[in-house]
């Protein structure tokens, strides 16, 4: 219904770059992100669509879990008016959604530093275990590569973060407990 309203011009999404497509909604499993202009008219159209959906599917929209996030350029008066129409909780800072950054405002290296930190914490937990080379390989492939590859499928990561992740993997693979060890393969 959002796509249909978007196609008819009744509800316009957002364009993230001049050459990008207009995005009105993204669906993930049981979550939906809706993107629209910050006007009362669009808020009413969205409220109407959500009401139709609830009646047709017999699923109520959970007001406590639903949030609205405004652009920094949206005036306080518009925020209040839209909030009164949608009745969603207003959030000032949407840090992460599904484990990924919702908005990139700082440097990418700062934002994705959590990847490096998560890898280091996992490796430190494994460091106490005496695993064979094959066991280490399984741990690396199963866990270490899964963390950054999920994010790398969505974002172009800074080279510094990729180098840190590779260094952590190499140190774990070739190390002996807390010692570094000799890397037989570059």
Image (cartoon, rainbow, N blue to C red):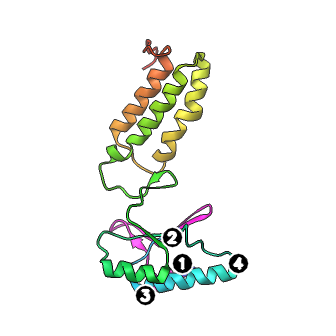
Location of mark 1 (residue): 2
Q: Residue furthest right?
A: 58
Residues at badges 1 and 2 in contact (C-beta under 8 Å)? yes
Q: Quadrant of the C terminus?
A: top left
Upstream in sequence: badge 4 or badge 2: 2
Q: Is residue 110 left or right of residue 32?
A: left
Q: Pointer 2: residues within 10 angstroms few (<14), some, or many (20+)?
A: some
Q: Nearer the viewer, mark 3 or mark 1?
A: 3
Residue under the image location 67 percent in, 83 percent down: 55
Residue under the image location 44 percent in, 15 percent down: 183
Image quarter of residue 62: bottom right
Q: Is residue 8 above or below residue 139?
A: below
Location of mark 4 (residue): 58
Location of mark 3 (residue): 41
Location of mark 2 (residue): 25
Residues at badges 4 and 3 in contact (C-beta under 8 Å)? no
């Amino acid at each position: 219904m959002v796509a249909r309203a978007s196609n008819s011009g009744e509800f316009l999404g957002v364009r993230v770059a001049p050459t990008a497509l207009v995005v009105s909604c993204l669906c993930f499993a049981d979550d939906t992100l809706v993107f629209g202009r910050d006007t009362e008219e669009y808020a009413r159209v969205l409220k109407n669509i959500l009401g139709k959906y609830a009646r047709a599917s017999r699923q109520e929209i959970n007001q406590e879990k639903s949030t609205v996030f405004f652009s920094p350029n949206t005036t306080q008066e518009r925020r209040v008016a839209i909030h009164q129409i949608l009745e969603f909780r207003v959030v000032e800072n949407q840090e992460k959604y599904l484990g990924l950054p919702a908005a990139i405002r700082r440097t990418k290296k700062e934002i994705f530093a959590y990847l490096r930190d998560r890898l280091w914490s996992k490796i430190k937990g494994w460091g106490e275990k005496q695993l064979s080379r094959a066991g280490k390989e399984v741990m690396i492939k199963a866990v270490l590569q899964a963390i950054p590859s999920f994010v790398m499928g969505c974002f172009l990561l800074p080279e510094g973060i990729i180098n840190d992740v590779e260094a952590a993997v190499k140190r774990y693979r070739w190390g002996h407990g807390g010692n570094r060890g000799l890397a037989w393969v570059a």
